[in-house]
Amino acid sequence: MPGADRRADPGPRAHEAVRAERADWGGLLEPSGSPLPQAHSAAHMQYVRGMPKAAKSSRTTATPDAPESAAGSRAAAQRLKMRRELAAAAMELFASKGYEATTVDEIAAQAGVARRTFFRHFRSKEEAIFPDHDDTLIRAEAVLNAAPAHEHPLDTVCRGIKEVMKMYAASPAVSVERYRLTREVPTLREREIASVARYERLFTRYLLGHFDEHAHHHGNDDPLLAEVAASAVVTAHNHVLRRWLRAGGQGDVEGQLDHAFGIVRRTFGTGIPAGRDTTPSGASATVSDGGEVLVTVARTDAPLDEVMRTIEKALRTRA
């Protein structure tokens, strides 16, 4: 909407109230106060060159025999390129002039485009520093959709959210600068929080799909477990990401991420079934009538913990 960036400033007291309200939030962002590394002056240059390429939606695949799909893919790539260029211009102006003093007209001029071009890509200036979340959400969903049948759903979700980390790690200088801005500007912080919530909803739906849908009645804890587990994965990711950003984008972030995911897996993994029906893809077990013989059938690539859960379930059933 044109003019969206010209809204009245609620004033410093309102801004402080928002910061206090968000002080205990455990997501990607955190209130101002802790030291942050100096941002690199060439961050806006790296933003265009360094960010990951646009992912194709899982719903359409471009092939040589489908020129319309190929054209659509090229158009999507051009759109993402323009969004990143606008974001780079916005980041540079926010860093030099300050967020409040920067206008949409100035961002468009810095990027060498008209004002109306800006509003074809973003609804307001606060959206301009988050050009890749939509694309990353598509990539994360594609990971979930392509998960092998034997993989534990929590492991799949952990692989899915790694797409978010890849987005930040592709351009550390830009990510550090964006982190600084989102901590200082309440409007940007709320925008980032909304983006994080989208990933949580995606992962919750995926985990919930591994329970028996007919059992989702009042008093059943499956929906609660799915939501809490999804939130734990996102929180673990964001904890590692914040630590990496405060270190200036330095360090073995992948190793730290795997360690954090291991904690989540040990905490929640045993409560989430590997699938609605694990017999075809994992393992099955039966106990003889005499209770003396346990027969187990498992695929060679079935995870050991899945086989053990199947055996325990069979024993409990006969108890």
Image (cartoon, rainbow, N blue to C red):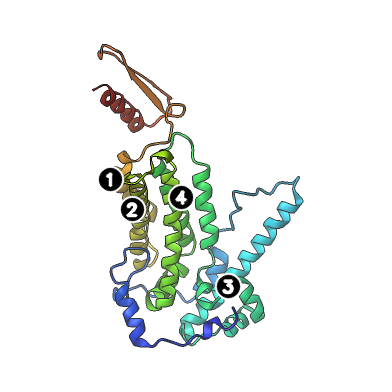
Q: Judge the density around disc 1: few (<14), some (14-19), many (≥20) Cα neighbours within 10 Å.
A: few
Quickly name the residue at label 4: 160
Check whether the beta carbons of the residues at disc 2 and disc 1 lie within 8 A of each other.
yes
The residue closer to the viewer here, 82 or 223, is 223
Quickly name the residue at label 1: 267
The residue sitting at 43% across, 26% down in the picture is 279
How far, Cα to Cα, is label 3 from label 1? 40 Å
Query: Element type at marker 2?
Result: helix
Task: Count all numbered tags in the image, as a single digit.
Answer: 4
* Earlier sequence position, callout 3 versus callout 2: 3
Q: Judge the density around disc 3: few (<14), some (14-19), many (≥20) Cα neighbours within 10 Å.
A: many
* 248 sits left or right of 67 in the view: left
The residue sitting at 35% across, 87% down in the picture is 12
Quickly name the residue at label 2: 232
Query: Dividing the picture into quarters, in which one does residue 214 lie?
Result: top left
From the top left corner, tell me how far across and down residue 319 is, in percent.
Answer: 23, 23
